[in-house]
Amino acid sequence: MLRGKGCEEEVAAAKVHRTNMKFRRQNEDHHEEFLPTGETSIDSYPNWLKFHIGINRYELYSRHNPAIEALLQDLVSQKITSVAMKSGGTQLKLIMTFQNYGQALFKPMNCLQHIQMGFANLEPRTLVWKWTMSALWQPRILDFRRVPPVAGRLVNMTREIRDVTRDKKLWRTFFISPANNICFYGECSYYCSTEHALCGKPDQIEGSLAAFLPDLSLAKRKTWRNPWRRSYHKRKKAEWEVDPDYCEEVKQTPPYDSGTRILDIMDMTVFDFLMGNMDRHHYETFEKFGNETFIIHLDNGRGIRKSTYLRLQLLAKEEYKLSLLMKESLLKDKIAPILYQPHLEAMDRRLRIVLKAVSDCIEKDGYDNVVENDFNTDVNTVTTER
């Protein structure tokens, strides 16, 4: 399902698609387009499959891939045919399957409803879904393209969740609130109880839908511990917070001793800081591409790429302000506004903090020791090996 140097992945994807077509033809009213060889044209593939085929060593999707915009439309318009709870995690997440056999992870909005429903105790991580929503547009502005496509959707909890789920554990948690609205809470390790219930208005709920990556049986992923993860202890600091030589030690350790992995970590760290994500304890890569590949941004002396540094400097200028570009980009979403002005202004403040930190490092250690030149000096373009 992933694109390498040859075309074998496209062939494999076509075989998967032909298998799926046996099950689809009875439900689809359009005629399939066939090539002279008897194989289906790639133009007839569903957008989620086009997205999967387009994944390569350097990015999840190309800058001008038309299938991504089409996939975002599918996420908000495709009929939901089944719903199941995703196992693991402290909060409820749902796996939604669409009529075209695509799948997405649904994270419900879970804050304003509680105020309107009259529940006293608010779940403290109430705005996580909003940052999840903006997680697609920020990396596109930063030119990262390592986050799966995400779109906002207004879901009917009765018709599109309760009535189509075969998950009895989920189904049993639906109830009607004192304000006569539909609610449910599902099962998870922490925020799944009546006091943390997800409630509609009266049965409509907003949430984010993140497109699935290729199945693990087709595209295995490797999980790595983030060298700069939090300690998750009230009194004990992480090693990188107390050891001044920690960074040099990491840089001598595979896979950070070669290639672009250390720079990818820096990109991810900047991205997380701008988003307010303090929980990046692990990250993933596709096994097929080995160590020389990008970091997948899921659940979303060190140096920094010159291309990243220049973009951050540009986004700090008044005419290209990050908050203004984010606000304009998020207006395209069906459930806009996603972020309110205080959230957008917070991103500008964090950007200034990042640039100040890089500036301090440059002043101390010199530009060439801090900023990694990832441009091809002959043609003044970013190198593809990134």
Image (cartoon, rainbow, N blue to C red):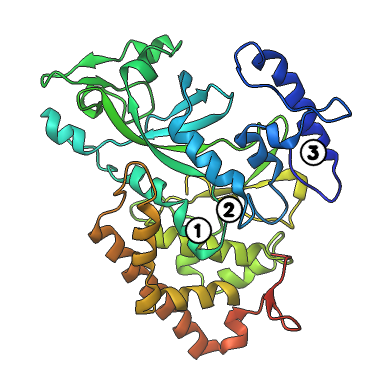
User: What residue appears at the point 33 percent right and 52 percent down from the top-left corner?
Assistant: 234
User: What residue appears at the point 35 percent right and 16 percent down from the top-left corner?
Assistant: 159
Occupied quadrant, residue 124? top left
**Residue wearing tag 3:** 10
Q: Choose between 302 and 162: the one closer to the eye.
A: 162
Image coordinates of residue 210 in percent, x first then y, are 49, 39
The disc placed on residue 40 is: none
User: What residue appears at the point 85 percent right and 25 percent down from the top-left corner?
Assistant: 38
Classed neighbour count for the residue bearing mark 3: other residues with Cα under 10 Å, few (<14), some (14–19), many (≥20): some
**Residue wearing tag 1:** 139
Q: CA distance from mark 2 to mark 1?
A: 7 Å
Q: Choose between 112 and 277: the one closer to the eye.
A: 112
Q: Amino acid at mark 1?
A: Pro
Vertical placement of residue 206 versus 80, above or below: below
- 94 vs 366, left or right, is left
Image coordinates of residue 219 in percent, x first then y, are 71, 37
- 2 vs 82, left or right, is right
Q: CA distance from mark 3 to mark 2?
A: 21 Å
Q: Earlier in the sequence, mark 3 or mark 1?
A: 3
**Residue wearing tag 2:** 146
Q: Are marks 2 and 1 in contact (CB under 8 Å)?
A: yes
